[in-house]
Amino acid sequence: MNVANLQLEGMLLAFTAVLRSLVASGALSEAQLKAALTEAEQTGLADQQRCDQLSPSQRDSIAFAARFLSIATRPDTDMRSFSAVAREVGRTT
């Protein structure tokens, strides 16, 4: 496996922990977090000129991080492994 992919997996897990901590401390509301991640996904997919040149799976790749963080930071779940969250992302897209 590509080492860069493993680094990205670790970064997403670390970022998940930070975001969950910010929500738990009250520094960021669940609604603000959800809005920010939705905005990130929409912005990534809004570049029509670029997205027209990409396959559907490549467009899903652009949105993956925002989708991953959205699922991984849901308030009704505990911290989960990368593969568990990634499987859920795959089922919901």
Image: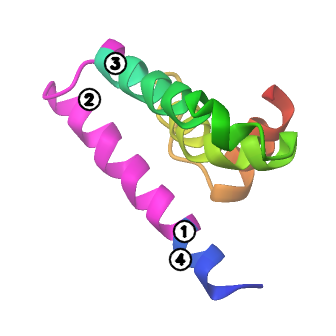
Lower sequence index among marks 2 and 3: 2
* Location of residue 46 with respect to 56 vertically, above or below: above
Query: Which type of secondary structure does the marked residue at label 2 adopt?
Result: helix
Determine the CA span between mark 1 and mark 2.
22 Å
For the point 57% across and 27% down, the residue is 46
Task: Point out the stretch of residues depicted in magenta.
Answer: 9-31
In this rendered view, identify the residue nearer to me: 49 or 68. 49
Q: Amino acid at mark 4?
A: Gln
For the point 13% across and 29% down, the residue is 27
Query: Which type of secondary structure does the marked residue at label 1 adopt?
Result: helix
According to the image, label 3 marks what residue?
30
Marks 2/3 in contact by CB < 8 Å: the verdict is yes
Marks 4/2 in contact by CB < 8 Å: the verdict is no
According to the image, label 4 marks what residue?
7
Q: Amino acid at mark 3?
A: Glu
Lower sequence index among marks 4 and 2: 4
According to the image, label 1 marks what residue?
8
